[in-house]
Image (spheres, rainbow, N blue to C red):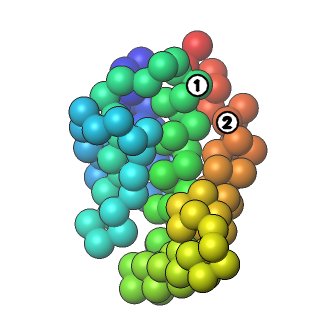
Amino acid sequence: MSKLKIAKEIIKNYNLKSNIIYTNNTNLGNYIADTDTIILCKKYHNSKEFLLSLLHEIKHAIDCKKLGKRGYVKKYNQASNLAINQGLNHYTNNKWEIKAERWAKNNFKKWEHLIK
């Protein structure tokens, strides 16, 4: 199954309508709340990295759907600012990033069969 088909199937399963874009960017993934778009890189080191990145971005989409775009962006930015004010990294110490990473790891087994 192609990565695009896997992504669409998982996104649909979580009742999301997020768009998917592939890029040559070196970031593993990104979520754009304003357009409900999940951006994935074209090349991953392995299938596990792809799936974990996809699930991580899906968690952001789920949170955005739950809180609304404005609410999600506001809370995400507040968490980034809090980290910065504590002398920490705005991304790696952002509670929304930490939650998304944990959620992706916890849900990996559910979807692992799609990449084997």
Residue 7 in view: yes
Residue 35, above or below 58: below
Q: Position of residue 82 (x, y in %)?
A: 61, 81
Residue 42 as seen in the image, left or right of residue 109: left
- Give the residue at mark 2: 108
Amino acid type at mark 1: Lys
Q: In which quarter of the image is the C terminus?
A: top right
Q: Give the label on residue 48, or none.
A: 1
Please tell me which residue is depicted at 40% across the width and 85% down the height of the picture.
Answer: 70
Residue 63, above or below 104: below
Residue 72, above or below 37: below
Q: Position of residue 73 (x, y in %)?
A: 43, 79
Front in this rendered view, residue 36 or 53: 53
Front in this rendered view, residue 66 or 40: 40
How crowded pointer 2 is (Cα within 10 Å; few <14, some 14-19, many 20+) is rated as: some
Q: Give the label on residue 32, or none.
A: none
Q: Find numbered disc 2 in the image and state the secondary structure of the residue it sits on.
A: helix
**Viewer-nearest of labels 1 and 2?**
1
Amino acid type at mark 2: Phe
Please tell me which residue is depicted at 48% across the width and 79% down the height of the picture.
Answer: 77
